Amino acid sequence: MAKPDYPVTPAVRFLRTQQIDFTPHPYPYREHGGTAHSAQCLGVDEHCVIKTIVLQNEAKQGCIMLMHGDRQVSTRKLARLLGMRHLEPATPQQANKWTGYLVGGISPFGIKTALPVYAQHSIFALPEIYINGGKRGFLVSLRPDALHSLPSTAVDAAAD
């Protein structure tokens, strides 16, 4: 079998193990380019590029929020929805420790520590999403129902 022309990350291994169909999309990574850069490189709507945000609560427990690339998370609203007092972005070091990925390459698939995953409900209405494949400069496209393979809960009002 020929070696794939994309990275085989823990996320890719997870998707293969779960028999989830995906299409790999390597692109030239740019520091602080975010979803706008990846969407432009792939020629897709930024709304369909899903960002993976690692957060921590007041007890320093982590969680992951999946949201449209063209939206911003309201940690105050999300904390209230989840019955927490406070949520804030995890430090890059803590995010790496929990997920095994570097910031800019964090995927919700194949993470080291089991974290609850929350997703904007409207993501599931898209026909296809583009989400990080576990490496900077690497997205995978798949059907949003693949997110159901994660310990996820859909939330609706956490975006501004």
Image: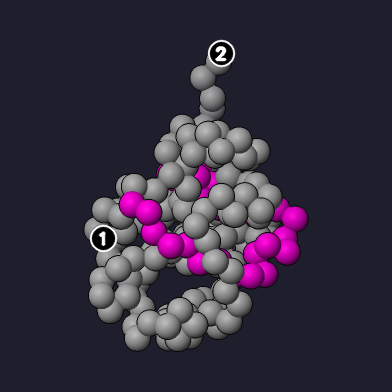
What whole-number distance in Å separates the C-alpha atoms at marks 2 and 1? 37 Å
- Report which quarter residue 49 is drawn in: bottom right
Image point 42% across, 53% down: which residue? 106
Which residue is nearer to you in this view: 26 or 156? 156
Q: Which residues are magenta?
A: 113-139
Locate residue 107, reporting x and y percent.
46, 51
Image point 42% across, 83% down: which residue? 83
Q: Which amino acid does the dot numbered 2 rest on?
A: Met
Disc 2 designates what residue? 1
* Quadrant of the snapshot with the N terminus: top right
For disc 2, the neighbor class at 10 Å (few under 14, some 14 to 19, many from 20) is: few
Locate residue 117, reporting x and y percent.
47, 62
Locate residue 66, reporting x and y percent.
52, 64
Q: Which mark is residue 94?
A: 1
* Quadrant of the snapshot with the C terminus: bottom right
Image point 62% across, 40% down: which residue? 20
Magenta span has 134? yes
Q: Is residue 34 above or below residue 84?
A: above
Q: Is residue 130 above or below residue 21?
A: below
Image point 43% across, 62% down: which residue? 116
For disc 1, the neighbor class at 10 Å (few under 14, some 14 to 19, many from 20) is: some
Q: Is residue 145 visible?
A: yes
Q: Is residue 47 above or below residue 148?
A: below
Q: Please, which residue is most extreme toward the top here?
A: 1
- Report which quarter residue 15 is drawn in: top right
Magenta span has 16? no
Circle 1: element type = helix
Q: Which amino acid does the dot numbered 1 rest on?
A: Gln
Circle 2: element type = loop
